[in-house]
Image (cartoon, rainbow, N blue to C red):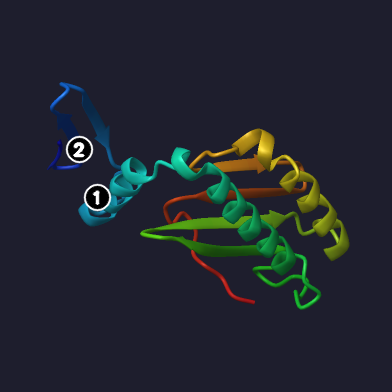
Amino acid sequence: MISISILGDVVVFSGDNSIYVKLQCRGDSSTSTCRSCLDTAFSGDVSGDAKSFNEKTRTLLYKLKEKASSKENIPNKKNYLYATGEESLGKMKLYAMVQCTQDLSIKNCSVCLNWILGKLPKCCNGKQGGRFLSTSCNFRYELYPFVKLTTI
């Protein structure tokens, strides 16, 4: 059995096997936010169903690519060539974002995102969080909310 104790902003885990972990939450996070993030981190073992997790991650990122490179995007708007989203994974959620630099056309944004999303299996296979950066576009996904969700 694992015991979780929050002492101020320091979290201490202890268990029957005498393994101890000490973590500190960011200074700007509340106790409830910290607790939620840690619960996600320690319950987020995707190794048991990595194939399904990888597929849901890929599907969400490609959906966001379509949203970011949609012709409905308006140049010079705050969220131009940018999209965020979430996907339910049972008790957890997957959060993701994609973005292109605003000097790209919608078509070139799509091409750039296709290229980096093609790197997903090599960089991030089965990982609970991942990101890939290129000079003109990037993606990121996590099992905790790291971005404000947007709508077009």
Residue at 17% over, 23% down: 17
Q: Residue 90: horizontal and vertical position, in percent?
A: 40, 60
47 or 13: nearer the viewer: 47
Residue type at mark 2 is Val
Residue 11: which numbered mark, if any? 2
Query: Height in image: 43 above or below 16?
Result: below
Q: Are marks 2 and 1 in contact (CB under 8 Å)?
A: yes
Query: Secondary structure beneath disc 2?
Result: strand
Q: Is residue 35 left or right of residue 113?
A: left
Residue type at mark 1 is Arg
Q: Residue 151: horizontal and vertical position, in percent?
A: 59, 75
Label 1 packing within 10 angstroms: few (<14), some (14-19), many (20+) = some
Q: Residue 139: horizontal and vertical position, in percent?
A: 64, 49
Q: Is residue 69 left or right of residue 93?
A: right
69 or 17: nearer the viewer: 17
Q: Quadrant of residue 71?
A: bottom right
Query: Height in image: 141 above or below 15?
Result: below
Query: Height in image: 4 above or below 61?
Result: above
Q: CA distance from mark 2 to mark 1?
A: 9 Å
Query: Secondary structure beneath disc 1?
Result: helix
Q: State which tag comes first along the sequence, 2 or 1.
A: 2
128 or 151: nearer the viewer: 128
Residue at label 1? 35
Query: Height in image: 22 above or below 5?
Result: above
Image quarter of the C terminus: bottom right
Residue 74: which numbered mark, if any? none
Residue at 77% over, 71% down: 70
Residue at 56% over, 70% down: 150
